[in-house]
């Protein structure tokens, strides 16, 4: 039961969506793009999210693609995680996504929604960070293609009125060997204590992490250590010494314990990919 | 932001109702259509008690707006009649208080349709979406598997 | 036995698998206003001001209640304002109520109420509450109205103390060669029934108060509202339809009072109050926490000679049922062991936590964790097999309980038999630790428990039977169908006694306090026992009446008549007889003349010989019988990561007699599931302001499908002679041993002694780190 109401729009094209956003804003509204909408519904209920003009992008064809074009796999931002899992075009993404929330909820949660979420785990972004994905973004200035590392810093830095349309990922990353584990406080349910995703490309490790800091990240500094010569322990110590801050210290687990878990997971990732 | 009149396809019927755009499908089903089979348990997408089927897939109706359901085939527990999974729930004592049961059955029903050959991994992946606080889940596992076995050719 | 023991399909099955079963919130006929609470965001704070002016302006708002003094409420001690005044004592406490036309309007208005608070120091654990100079949760503890056997200590946070003094402590310690002492603690947690609590109230123009509530205690709602507010008890009618899980959490009376006050504020119009999940977790009463210290002394043979126990129960901000939980914890304080020399203090402490209601097991799963972990520590120190230690100390007929009840073959189950059976089912002989590979081990832990039900000494249970014209019977009992299937079992008991087809017995699922005979509360695994006894008596009543008419018609003495298959007939010639349908409403001769009358069977039961406890020694008879059980949990433990999976959980319980096999298995396995979740994951996390940081089901996490182990259940059947067909209460027992057995398994696996719940990998990691640092 949301304590507020909104106008609801279902544009059929990107152009219409973007123009609608601008128009509504000019009218003094607080428009919001909506694909799965699970955050607006659940956080709105407890007064942590608000919109009075919802623009549902699920009917826009570009937001629903899932296909290769040349060497690139395009995945629409409005596809549900379940749809992506069932089709399984990107095994690492499938594996990471399949640990988000639960199966039924993933039928509603979308790729774009997860990446742009307020809740800071945003795990679906991890494979994209590792795979040098390109993001197709549409906004008042038209469509742009941006390398994920240039626009995802802790969160997706969208400007007002911009919308994530698709992700594009090169085939060689999709076919690269990978490793991923989601470790929770206990058993198989709940937010991540640590979710780690790792990939080996051009003989180099890449690693991205959610749950360690209040944002998901890929750390090239940590990777540099992991890719050095030396004992496993030294390499991991090095990687742990250059982690971003702050380390989460909350009800899911203390900072020190998270580091303990991460150390072991890094070890497992290295073993699996070496 | 006046109320909207929308037409939904629910349990094989065409129903026209008036809702706020921000009303969830759960709220509309219960409040506007009198379908109280889907249960509110958390309104947060966590417990699965409000699970229904939308176009054959399980959906937590607290996570969906009523306006999003326009043009889709919605089935609630009231739309199932003497299905194998309902009979199996009775036989296996796969319910106690019954509150999670409509949601659990709708999830199982969809699972059996989408994956008639589901293995343990798939069953777990699907069914961990619902909480049952009374049973041990073993009863529910038995119920699902008894239907899977029956649906195997020659099984 | 024809019907008893069979897995008779539950009477509520068809409606529950079709979505037609209705719970309180599902009844929506006619106009009903919505009520929304404003709740405290802090654990302990002074209310400086409440501004409702903006909320008043919201369209549809009918009434706002805030800052008003109402009579204090609470069961053992009247310490709780229904809506907070002057200060708040826990995170989630109701501070204001809004009544509006729709739930949306009520929520919008509630959000606009501005409450100004001034923070007060927080009492964040019972141990802290116990310390001298701790902040006081209740400043005027001496002024509250209370029940006779509650003893709050003004100027402290002690809501009450129960003492057990038995034997001679100095003698006991002198005989003890080996002594272990350990402390344990865990925070409060939640019942997390899938149906959040809901209550509606309406006050008719003639003063009739109609309440509908998802409650285990509709008759208590009636009594308490009459008592608190001076209402006519006969004018209060409480309806309880099916209840969506309860586990003790719905035995407390809370929302009903708020709904009643809300209805009163709008001229008696019907009002509904439905908890959000967050409110259900923090505002409504929770599962009690505990800080415990246990000291055991044993002789060289492993016989426990002395025990000194202190329980500090985390009753939370208001004592309500926590006082009774504390008492129950004293009564069975030792676990199921015969200990001659015993000293126990069981304190109910006030803290700034959500207040406690009963929780399945009623203090026993909690104290068992402390006792059973200590038993393992003792076994370790004695270098003895942990099951052997339990076996030789097992309580048995001839022993006395902590409150000095003499046990006999009927009032206590056979624990040694349970232990023997556990050994077999749990493959105990293969050893505690089995290596899977260098990194993984499979490890076992065991525990035992016992429990009596410490209910009111005058608690009644009643049953009415009426006939339909086709000879079928309607069974009305005040037992609430909370999921346990008890009403189906009652039908089985009736069918067995009347030797009739259980399908011809119709059970009324709903309870209303005006027409359903009272069953005190549907708690404490008493439904089958007390309701069953009432059914047997009602059956006897019906048999006499049926035979009376039949004797007349058949011209035969009553003694020559038998009853079976819905007929009364001659013992030596069953072909001569009458069907129930021909006599249930009197017998009509061909000429129209009628004899007899409508047959209405009545039966009631009250537990006998229960007494209060002596305030100095605890001596007294607190409950009718002790059900006993033995448990095992096996885990697969990762020695590197300290994570583990649940492999197998086993309960062997002396059930007296199995009434409905699948229902009984369901009760035991479901309880184990809940116990493992409590032991392994569920807890409230508090911050320094006393706020619960995880009040949602995505952060407060019950067990999910596939996280469960394999379950093994064994039954021992030592009939309880007073029980219907020998049955013992069994609804709670599967749960009670899980925290202890899992704690023991994990301690064995990790090689460190674990003293807290929940048993998460981080807890193991901390203990390992502490051990490492200690050894450096």
Image: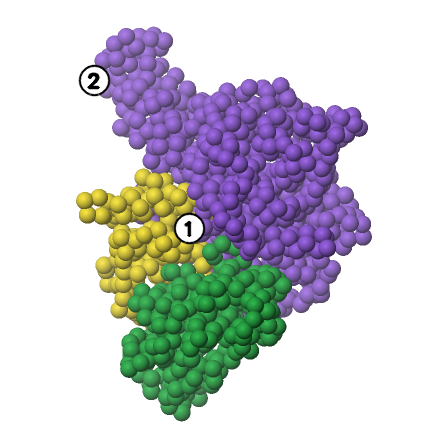
Q: Which residue is mark 1?
A: C705
Please tell me the colour of chain A: green
Residue in front for this viewpoint, C158 or C697? C697
Tell me the distance, in whole angstroms, between the alpha carbons under discs 1 and 2.
63 Å
Question: Which chain is displayed in yellow in the rendered image?
Answer: B
Q: Is residue C279 above or below residue A94?
A: above
Of the image marks 1 and 2, the number of the one nearer the N terminus:
2
Please tell me the colour of chain C: purple
In this rendering, do the residues under marks 1 and 2 share a single chain? yes
Q: Position of residue C162 (x, y in %)?
A: 71, 36
Dot 1, crowdedness within 10 Å: few (<14), some or many (≥20)? many
Residue in front for this viewpoint, C763 or C615? C763
Residue under the point 48% across and 37% down: C650
Q: Quadrant of residue A18?
A: bottom left
The answer to whether residue C658 is visible is yes
Q: Position of residue C58 (x, y in %)?
A: 51, 70
Q: Secondary structure at mark 1?
A: loop
């Amino acid at each position: 039961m949301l304590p507020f109401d909104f106008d609801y729009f279902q544009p059929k094209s990107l152009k219409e969506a973007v123009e609608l956003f601008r128009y509504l804003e000019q009218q003094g509204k607080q428009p919001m793009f909506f694909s799965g909408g699970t955050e607006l519904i659940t956080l709105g209920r407890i007064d942590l999210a608000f919109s009075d003009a919802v623009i549902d992008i699920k009917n826009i064809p570009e937001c629903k693609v899932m296909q290769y074009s040349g060497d690139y796999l395009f995945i629409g931002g409005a596809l549900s995680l379940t749809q992506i899992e069932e089709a399984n075009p990107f095994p690492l993404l499938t594996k990471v996504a399949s640990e988000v929330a639960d199966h039924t909820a993933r039928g509603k949660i979308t790729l774009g929604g997860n990446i742009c979420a307020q809740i800071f785990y945003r795990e679906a972004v991890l494979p994209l960070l590792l795979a040098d994905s390109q993001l197709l973004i549409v906004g008042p200035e038209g469509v742009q293609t941006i390398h994920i590392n240039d626009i995802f810093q802790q969160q997706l830095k969208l400007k007002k009125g911009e919308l994530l349309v698709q992700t594009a990922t090169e085939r060689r990353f999709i076919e690269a060997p990978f490793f991923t584990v989601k470790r929770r406080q206990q058993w198989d349910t709940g937010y991540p204590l640590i979710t780690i995703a790792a990939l080996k490309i051009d003989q180099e490790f890449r690693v991205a992490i959610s749950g360690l800091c209040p944002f998901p990240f890929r750390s090239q500094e940590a990777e540099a250590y992991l890719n050095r010569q030396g004992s496993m322990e030294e390499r991991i110590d090095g990687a742990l010494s250059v982690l971003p801050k702050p380390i989460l210290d909350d009800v899911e687990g203390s900072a020190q314990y998270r580091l303990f878990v991460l150390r072991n997971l890094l070890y497992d990732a290295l073993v699996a990919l070496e | 932001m006046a109320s909207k009149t929308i037409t939904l396809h629910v349990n094989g019927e065409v129903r026209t109702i008036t809702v706020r755009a921000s009303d969830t499908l759960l709220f509309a089903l219960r409040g506007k259509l009198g379908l109280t089979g889907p249960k509110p348990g958390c309104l947060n997408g966590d417990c699965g008690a409000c699970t229904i089927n939308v176009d054959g897939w399980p959906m937590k109706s607290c996570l969906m707006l009523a306006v999003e359901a326009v043009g889709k085939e919605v089935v609630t527990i009231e739309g199932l009649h003497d299905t194998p999974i309902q009979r199996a729930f009775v036989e296996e004592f796969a319910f106690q208080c019954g509150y999670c049961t409509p949601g659990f059955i709708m999830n199982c029903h969809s699972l059996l349709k989408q994956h008639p050959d589901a293995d343990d991994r798939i069953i777990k992946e699907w069914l961990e979406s619902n909480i049952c606080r009374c049973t041990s889940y073993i009863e529910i596992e038995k119920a699902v598997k008894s239907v899977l076995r029956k649906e195997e050719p020659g099984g | 036995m024809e019907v008893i023991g069979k897995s008779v399909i539950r009477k509520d099955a068809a409606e529950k698998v079709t979505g037609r079963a209705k719970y309180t919130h599902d009844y929506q006929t006619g106009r009903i206003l919505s009520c929304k609470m404003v709740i405290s965001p802090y654990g302990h704070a002074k209310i400086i001001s409440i501004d409702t002016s903006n909320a008043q302006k919201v369209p549809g708002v009918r009434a706002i209640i805030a800052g008003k003094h109402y009579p204090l409420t609470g069961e053992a001690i009247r310490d709780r304002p229904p809506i907070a005044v002057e200060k708040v004592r826990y995170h989630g406490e109701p501070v204001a109520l809004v009544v509006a036309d729709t739930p949306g309007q009520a929520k919008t208005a509630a959000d606009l109420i501005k409450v100004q608070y001034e923070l007060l120091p927080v009492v964040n654990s019972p141990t802290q509450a116990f310390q001298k100079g701790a902040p006081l949760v209740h400043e005027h503890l001496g002024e509250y109205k209370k029940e006779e056997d509650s003893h709050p200590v003004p100027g402290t946070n002690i809501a009450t103390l129960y003492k057990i003094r038995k034997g001679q402590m100095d003698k006991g310690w002198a005989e003890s060669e080996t002594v272990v002492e350990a402390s344990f603690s865990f925070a409060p947690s939640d019942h997390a029934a899938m149906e959040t609590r809901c209550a509606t109230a309406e006050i008719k123009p003639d003063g009739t108060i109609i309440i509908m509530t998802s409650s285990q205690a509709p008759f208590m709602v009636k009594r308490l509202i009459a008592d608190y507010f001076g209402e006519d008890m006969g004018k209060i009618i409480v309806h309880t339809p099916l209840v969506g899980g309860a586990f003790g959490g719905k035995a407390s009376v809370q929302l009903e009072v708020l709904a009643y006050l809300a209805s009163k504020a709008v001229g008696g119009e019907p009002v509904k109050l439905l908890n959000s999940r967050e409110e259900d977790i923090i505002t409504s009463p929770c599962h009690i926490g505990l800080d415990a210290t246990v000291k055991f002394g044993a002789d060289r043979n492993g016989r426990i000679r002395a025990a000194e126990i202190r329980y500090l129960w985390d009753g939370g901000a208001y004592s309500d049922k926590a006082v009774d939980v504390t008492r129950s914890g004293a009564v069975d304080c030792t676990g199921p062991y015969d200990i001659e020399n015993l000293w126990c203090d069981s304190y109910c402490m006030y803290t700034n936590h959500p207040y406690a209601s009963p929780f399945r097991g009623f203090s026993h799963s909690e104290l068992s964790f402390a006792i059973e972990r200590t038993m393992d520590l003792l076994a370790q120190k004695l270098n003895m097999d942990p099951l052997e230690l339990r076996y030789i100390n097992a309580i048995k007929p001839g022993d006395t309980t902590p409150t000095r009840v003499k046990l006999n073959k009927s009032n206590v189950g056979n624990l040694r038999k349970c232990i023997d059976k556990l050994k077999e089912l749990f493959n105990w002989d293969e050893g505690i630790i089995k290596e899977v590979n260098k990194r993984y081990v499979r490890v076992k832990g065991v525990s035992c428990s016992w429990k009596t039900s410490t209910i009111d000494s005058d608690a009644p249970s009643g049953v009415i039977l009426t006939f339909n014209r086709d000879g079928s019977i309607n069974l009305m009992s005040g037992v609430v169908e909370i999921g346990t299937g008890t009403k189906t079992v009652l039908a089985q008991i009736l069918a067995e006694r009347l030797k009739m087809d259980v399908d011809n017995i119709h059970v009324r699922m709903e309870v209303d306090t005006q027409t359903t005979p009272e069953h005190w509360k549907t708690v404490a695994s008493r439904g089958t026992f007390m309701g069953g006894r009432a059914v047997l008596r009602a059956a006897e009543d019906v048999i006499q009446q049926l035979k009376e008419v039949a004797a007349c018609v058949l011209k035969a003495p009553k003694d020559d008549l038998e009853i079976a298959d819905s007929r009364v007939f001659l013992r030596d010639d069953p072909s001569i007889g009458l069907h129930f349908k021909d006599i249930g409403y009197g017998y009509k001769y061909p000429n129209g003349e009628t004899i007899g009358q409508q047959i209405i069977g009545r039966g009631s039961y009250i537990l006998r010989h229960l007494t209060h406890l002596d305030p100095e020694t605890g001596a007294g008879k607190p409950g009718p019988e002790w059900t006993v059980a033995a448990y095992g949990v096996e885990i697969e433990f990762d020695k590197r990561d300290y994570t583990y999976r649940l492999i197998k959980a086993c309960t062997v319980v002396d059930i007296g007699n199995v009434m409905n096999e699948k229902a009984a298995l369901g009760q035991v396995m479901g309880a184990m599931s809940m116990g493992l979740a409590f032991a392994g994951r569920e807890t409230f996390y508090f911050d320094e302001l006393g706020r619960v940081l995880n009040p949602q089901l995505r952060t407060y996490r019950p067990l999910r499908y596939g996280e469960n182990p394999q379950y093994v259940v064994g039954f021992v059947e030592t009939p309880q002679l007073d029980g219907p067909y020998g049955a013992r209460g069994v609804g709670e027992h599967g749960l009670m041993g899980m925290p202890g057995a899992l704690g023991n398994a994990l301690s064995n696996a990790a090689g460190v002694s674990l003293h807290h719940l929940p048993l998460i990998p981080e807890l193991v990691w901390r203990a390992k780190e502490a051990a490492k640092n200690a050894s450096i």
